[in-house]
């Protein structure tokens, strides 16, 4: 990309105007696994971690030119649906499932060694996703236990976890749960956290502005059902957010599948023009005011106006997308067959 085109793209994305040159996904090197990679953490243009089925955990430190398999030993039966990495050495992974299948591991040496720091012993709990406010403080989300969603909290980088009181957690709807499809059903910004749901009579977004101790909830117009709801949340800051979803068993039909907020999740309005298909992951492009990317098994879309309208730019199957927090326009995506891509 020439300097002139680069400057044009930077200006266009910052102002919310579609650039002349649309983005594209470029495949990275063969990861060496065939598992579906639903967990992804983009640290920089060179460093990224991915995780998925069959105990798969991968790391690159050369921009995707090569990948190392660095998962914990004896975890081939686990589904690592979410991963949060802070640099080339430190990462936290979450495996999903009922009872003791829900576990959290932590590494501080690039995956050479891992410590199991949480194992769920409640057969009624099912953990879906994790998110960190900073390298020390983070949350993990479980589906409802005794009628309320359960929150785990850490203040030491994932070395230890505690279940937060549910006194200030609104009651769950009948059949309501979160989707462990992309590691993005729970997200954080500043002191705020949000998680999204489906499965019940309404798709809802729960919000906390005190790092998970107290919660409020708002309904959205995104359709909900046994397999339908909001699968992913992305927030630019504590006020501006996008929710995407649909139903995984109807990937090419998701009317009213995107909602946006400008007040921190208190109210949500449907996008003026949504992708129209199921989207499982979304990410706000850093250092832009209005640019959001959404991915799913039938393609990828980009919005240059904070999620109000969308343009398709790729047709390949992807499950999740993540952008490096402190680098401009550095985004990665992953999905089936062990594939990982970078935005170009």
Image: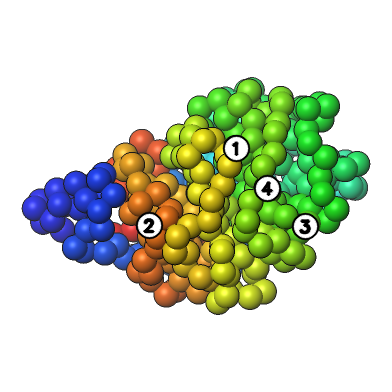
Residue 271 drawn at (x, y percent): 48, 57
Q: Is residue 239 visible?
A: yes
What residue does disc 3 label?
A: 201
What residue does disc 4 label?
A: 219
167 vs 110, left or right, is right
As displayed, is residue 238 above or below residue 291? above
Residue 151 drawn at (x, y percent): 74, 35
* Mark before the other along the chain sequence, 2 or 1: 1
* Mark before the other along the chain sequence, 2 or 3: 3
What residue does disc 2 label?
A: 303
* Mark before the other along the chain sequence, 2 or 4: 4
Q: Nearer the viewer, mark 2 or mark 1?
A: 1
What element does badge 4 sit on?
strand
Residue 184 drawn at (x, y percent): 58, 49
Q: Residue at x 77, y 57 (%)?
A: 201
What element does badge 1 sit on?
loop
The quadrant in which the N terminus is found is bottom left
Q: Nearer the viewer, mark 2 or mark 4?
A: 4
Q: CA distance from mark 3 to mark 1?
A: 19 Å
Q: Is residue 79 visible?
A: no
* Mark before the other along the chain sequence, 3 or 1: 3
What residue does disc 1 label?
A: 266
As displayed, is residue 307 above or below residue 193? below
Q: CA distance from mark 2 to mark 3?
A: 28 Å
């Amino acid at each position: 990309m020439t300097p002139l085109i680069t400057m044009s793209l930077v200006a266009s994305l910052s102002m919310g105007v579609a650039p002349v040159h649309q983005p594209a996904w470029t495949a990275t090197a063969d990861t060496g696994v065939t598992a579906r990679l639903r967990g992804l953490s983009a640290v920089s243009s060179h460093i990224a971690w991915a995780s998925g089925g069959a105990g798969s955990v991968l790391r690159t430190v050369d921009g995707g030119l090569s990948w190392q398999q660095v998962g914990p030993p004896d975890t081939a039966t686990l589904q690592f649906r979410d991963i949060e990495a802070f640099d080339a050495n430190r990462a936290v992974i979450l495996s999903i499932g009922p009872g003791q299948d829900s576990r959290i591991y932590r590494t501080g040496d690039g995956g050479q060694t891992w410590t199991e720091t949480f194992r769920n012993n409640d057969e009624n709990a099912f953990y879906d996703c994790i998110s960190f406010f900073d390298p020390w403080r983070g949350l993990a989300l479980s589906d409802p236990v005794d009628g309320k969603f359960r929150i785990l909290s850490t203040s030491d980088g994932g070395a230890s976890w505690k279940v937060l009181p549910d006194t200030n957690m609104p009651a769950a709807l009948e059949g309501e749960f979160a989707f462990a499809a992309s590691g993005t059903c729970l997200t954080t910004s500043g002191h705020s956290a949000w998680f999204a749901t489906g499965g019940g009579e309404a798709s809802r977004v729960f919000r906390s502005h005190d790092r998970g101790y107290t919660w409020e909830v708002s309904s959205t117009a995104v359709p909900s059902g046994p397999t339908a709801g909001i699968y992913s949340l992305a927030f630019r800051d504590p006020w501006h957010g996008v929710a995407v979803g649909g139903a995984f068993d109807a990937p090419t039909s998701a009317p009213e599948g995107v909602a946006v907020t400008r007040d921190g999740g208190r109210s949500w309005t449907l996008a003026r023009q949504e992708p129209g298909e199921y989207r499982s992951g979304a990410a706000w492009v850093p250092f832009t005011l209005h640019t959001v990317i959404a991915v799913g098994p039938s393609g990828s879309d980009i919005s240059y106006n904070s999620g109000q309208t969308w343009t398709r730019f790729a047709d390949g199957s992807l499950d999740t997308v993540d952008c490096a927090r402190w680098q401009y326009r550095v985004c990665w995506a992953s999905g089936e067959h062990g594939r990982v891509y970078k935005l170009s």
